[in-house]
Amino acid sequence: SEARTVSYPRSTISLREYYSLRERPRLGASERVPQIPVWDVLPRSSASMIVVHAVDRPSEVLTAVSGACTGNCVLITRVKYDGEGVVFGQESLQQLDILRAHEKQGSTCFLHMADWHRKADVEEDPYLHLPPELDVMCLPPELAASAPQATRVQWSSIHHQLKSMLQAFNPDFFKTHVFATGVINPAVCQNFSEICRSPSNIREFEATPTSRNGRRHTPIEIQASVEVRLWIQNLQSPPSCEKARILVFCYTNPNLAGHGAQFHAMAEALTYSLAANRTLMVDDSCPWSLSPLSPSRQGFWGHYFERISTCQDLPGLEGVLRAGEKGSASQRVLLWDSKTTQMKLQPPEHAQDWCGGEAQFTSKCVPPRFQSLGRAWWTSVLLAAVLRPNQELEDRIQAVVAQLEPTSGRPNIGIHLRQGHKYIEMPPSRPERYENQILLIAERLLKRKWNGTRETQVAQLRSRVASRAPWINIFVATEDGSALDAIQTFSQDIGAKLTVVDPSHDRPNLRVSIPMAVRAGLLDVQRENLVSLVSLFVMARSSEVFIGSFSSGWSR
């Protein structure tokens, strides 16, 4: 079986010693072995305590050791969670499900939270963005009786318990970093219904034959796009800016939103502007973690994009009402910000039919004469109208487009492999799923059916294109360096040319949101913005085929 790295732990004398360690328990030397030798690590006699800690596949190891930890044995495992959403990912839920079953052997499991990774003697703590460590301790009856019962695992409401525990244990972290106002129910909970709830309307996505084959814009869509662009242009260029009715957009959810979420929020604000006949302006001084403030250009929009309106001077916002607030319809200037998106916003007076009979104005609202074309089409036209790169960003985009060698005639496949913090919503797909889609696309492009195992199919494709490699371009955007390496290897195997923006850029696949990583000094905001924005425009303009992560606003 595949070779894996295994760390043999040193033993601790007692539970007290384990939890009194200043830092993580030190592990011994690693060696390459043909499989995880769990049974070689376990004592020959009955174990008194087993700690599963700092391993690559904790649920796999935990499954093996659970059966060996019986009687008076203590079983402890580190369980990771997201500190911003206060939610467990798929791997952690697998661990918890194993421990829930382990309780049937007579033990009782408790949560234990600690701040081992913090260094109190360092004035500027580099770990302040990390949530407290969490262990689950499954204790035999004698120890369980003296354990604090408030920390006993509540399997049916463990996300509620985690959130309450985090708030009590470290209120400063909770106040600064936790963004979730309620409890997140991630899609992965569908597989762990005994532990957590999942959204009721989530289903597995399957590409339709139409989406696999693609299509061109119809004449009706092209004509409608021209009509909407002209409508926006006229609205955004009023005869008199002093008399124009204005809607001021302020960056929404500034501590968490990435580019995709922010651009979709702007599209919703622009829809409201069109419905209310108001000129949309961006207040670039509004805070956003991705704004690279500088003396020369005020904020994010000024750094990367052209103005969205001919009106340049923002009106004063003191005392200005938000869109939808009582009395706002008669005001010349209104505000659109995070609180606006949380309100139950009614459609403007003359746009009651924009929302399909719904009483609330949301991102689903589309003018009646364009509703047959779909919400995705409508949003795409709005974003194309306002997302106009300035010359500096456009030059960077064109430099990457040139790397794709547009005159070569090679097809372009764009891949957005979203990893990192997105796991709080649904489990990210491994690179193999994207690679399998590329094999299917290659069948259609080359009019050839591959047979056999995946390795055999890759060999057949490589043989087919050997005389004309590279025969296809693969353009990748991801924050996961290891996933990028996997796609790079696959591209070489099938005779494809892989292109990525700024190859030397570190892609650490952080388990915190990119805005938080920027605030913590883990990522450079200018470099992150450029990699993301250049990738977005290159992919949108050049890809004949796009394979994305549907839970990502950037992909949508």
Image (cartoon, rainbow, N blue to C red):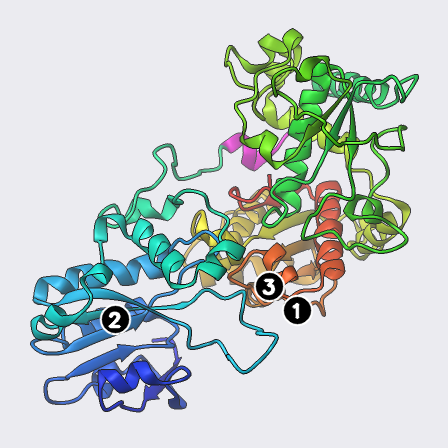
Residue 211 falls within the magenta-colored stretch = yes
Q: Amino acid at mark 3?
A: Leu
Q: Regarding mark 3 in the picture, which secondary structure is present there?
A: helix
Residue 284 falls within the magenta-colored stretch = no
| Up-down relation of residue 247 to residue 156 (above or below) | above
Residue 205 versus residue 70: which sits nearer the camera?
70
Kindly report the distance in space between the C-alpha atoms of the residues bearing marks 2 and 3. Answer: 29 Å
Relative side of 97 to 508, left or right: left
- Which residue matches tag 1? 506
Residue 222 placement (x, y as % from top left) = 75, 21
Report the disc number at residue 356.
none
Where's the N terminus, which quadrant? bottom left
Q: Amino acid at mark 1?
A: Asp
| Image point (75%, 45%), residue name | 537
Residue 406 versus residue 307: which sits nearer the camera?
307
Q: Which residues are magenta?
A: 209-215
